[in-house]
Amino acid sequence: MALMIDSSVYIDWMRKRFEFMPEIVRLHPANPVFSCGVIEAEVGRGILSARQRDRFLEFTNLLYKIDTDETIWKETGNLAWQLDRKGITLPLTDLTIAACAKKAGATLVTLDSDFKKIPGLKVQNRLP
């Protein structure tokens, strides 16, 4: 099963000082792990230490990347439009992450319950 790990999970792990890198590496061969620029930027902006930030960004180079290209932005806009019509307003960052996960065919691992409101997105709150 392909996975994309949301910023909320990385931030939680870092606060708890959980060594997630070995866990992701263990999963990676059987469960491809994806990332995208929005996740990396959200996590990176909150890391206080330049050394720890560099380490996190180096780690993300081990993951498969989903580029935020024109198709991602169109899907983000479509999701925003569909949800807005239902009275559900979500941040564009979350919608972009969802579009990236959908493009990868990945289940999004997240602690943010808002992602459950996005049609067609597979969501779970922990690693397999």
Image (cartoon, helix red, strand yellow):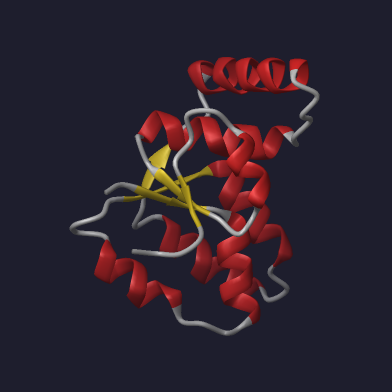
Q: Who's the residue at 60% across and 76% down the image?
A: 14
Q: Tell which residue pokes out farthest to the front in this image.
A: 86
**Residue in front for this viewpoint, 52 or 82:** 82
**Residue in front for this viewpoint, 100 or 82:** 82
Q: Who's the residue at 44% across and 75% down the image?
A: 20
**Horizontal and vertical percent position of residue 42:** 67, 53
Q: Who's the residue at 76% across and 15% down the image?
A: 85
Left or right of 103? Residue 29 is left
Query: Height in image: 82 above or below 64?
Result: above
Q: Who's the residue at 37% across and 41% down the image?
A: 106
Query: Height in image: 115 above or below 21?
Result: above
**Horizontal and vertical percent position of residue 9:** 56, 63
Left or right of 65? Residue 39 is right
Q: Tell which residue pokes out farthest to the bottom in this image.
A: 17
Please identify the quarter of the rendering in which residue 117 is found: top right
Q: How many marks?
A: 0
The quarter in which the C terminus is drawn is bottom left
**Horizontal and vertical percent position of residue 78:** 62, 15
Query: Height in image: 49 above or below 77?
Result: below
Query: Height in image: 46 above or below 17?
Result: above
Left or right of 92? Residue 67 is left
**Horizontal and vertical percent position of residue 21:** 40, 73
